[in-house]
Each structure stands twice: as C-alpha cells, then as structure tokens.
Image (cartoon, grey):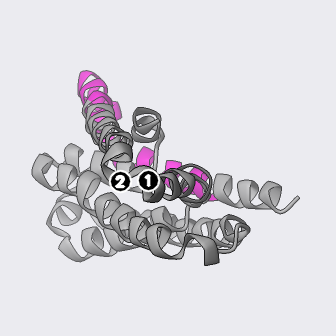
Amino acid sequence: MGIVGGLMPSPLHLIAITQAALHRWRRAILILVGPPLAIDGALLVVTLFFFRYVPHNIAHAVAYIGGATLLIFAGYSLYEMRRKTREELEKSESLTYAGVIAASLTELTAPGTWIYWLTIAGPILAQGRIIGYWRVAPFFIGGLAGYYGAAIFSVWLLYWGASLHKKFKQRLMLVANLLLVVLGIGYLINAAYLGK
C-alpha cells in the first residue's frame, strides 16, 4: 500500500521534481520525506487518541479545501514562472518555501489521506490497542518504507527520463505546475463524488 501511495503523484512529488531539475537533490528528498512524515505523525496521534470522535465524512469536506488550495498554488506558481527567468527561479527561496507549505497543506487535505487514516489505519490502531501496538507496528513501518522508497524512486525516474530529452528537461517545471492544476481539478471532482 505504501508503494502505491509513493508512486501516485502529489504536489510534494511535483515540487521535488522541480527541485531535482534545479539540481537540488538534497532539498528534493527533504521535501519528499519531511512534510509527509510530519503530516502522518500528526494524523497518527489524532487517529490513536481521537478516532472515535472524527466524523467519517471529513474526507468530503477536506477534499474541497485541498482542491481549491492546490489550484491557487498552481496558479501562483504558473504566474511566477511567467514573471521570472530560469536563473531567477533557481535563486528564489521564498517561492520554494511557500510552495512546500501550500503543498503540505494540500497533502493534509487530500481525500486519500483521510480515507486511509479513517478506514485502514484507524481500525488497525484500534486492533493494536487490544493485541499490542508492537504487533501492528510492522504494517506502519512497511508502509512508510514502501511510500518513501517509491516516492524517491519515482522522482529520480522522472528526472532521469527528462534528462534524456533536453527540451523536456527545460519544460519540466512548466509540466509539473500544469500537473498541479490537473491534481487540483481531480481533488474537486473526487470531492463531488465523495458527497454522493
């Protein structure tokens, strides 16, 4: 399950790809690992202590918020790309930090994140409360290893593929930002179907 999540494109994946295109691999890996670990840690605590009180239709509500946030972030990124040259984008620190925060908030409000924690992780943690948390820990450890391994591998694979074609590599940031728009629209469509 973790591998599938790591291979699915997310805003953080796309930001990491743009960082890889700028030859900032350390930052790309930090973006892929840091925010999801913090988000999953917070959701682990919420699920562990408050699972019974979290409304199960929350995925529907946060999907709309996530889609809107993602579209705003993508629009801002596309606007900044038009205004700045490649050299200016490479030196732009504030855009990167703002982008990571926006992408992290979008990741937190992704419907899949809440569905996972409410329908899979929550019941497993409830079972762990009865049989012991050490017996369910391998599920979470394996999921994390699979997720981060697949996420880093997929970003590297996309970067490697882009490096084979110089024109595509030059357009990698544009492609990544356009994919953010597609993801935002997908979140909104998913939210509409969750409500039915």
Say above or below: 138 vs 187.
Answer: above
Helix or strand or loop: what does disc 1 sit on? helix
Q: Which residue type does callout 2 highlight?
A: Tyr
Other-residue count near label 1 (Cα within 10 Å), few / some / many at <14 / 14–19 / ≥20: some
| Left/right of residue 164 with respect to residue 91 in the rendered view | right
Residue highlighted by disc 2: 133
Q: 6 or 50: nearer the eye?
A: 50
Determine if residue 76 is in view. Answer: no
Q: Quadrant of the C terminus?
A: bottom right
Figure check: 111 above or below 92: above
Residue at numbered disc 1: 128
In three-dimensional space, the C-alpha distance between marks 2 and 1, rounded to whole angstroms, equals 4 Å
Mark 2 touching mark 1, by CB under 8 A? yes
Where in the figure is residue 145, as x and y percent of width and height?
27, 39
Tell me the residue at 24%/27% (across/down). 160
Q: Residue at x 26, y 68 (%)?
A: 96
Where residue 140 is drawn, which disc sits there? none
The number of numbered badges drawn on the structure is 2
Q: What x and y, as percent, mark residue 57? A: 73, 68
* First to last magenta residue range: 157-184
User: Which label's residue is closer to the chain start, 2 or 1?
Assistant: 1
Tag 1: amino acid? Gly
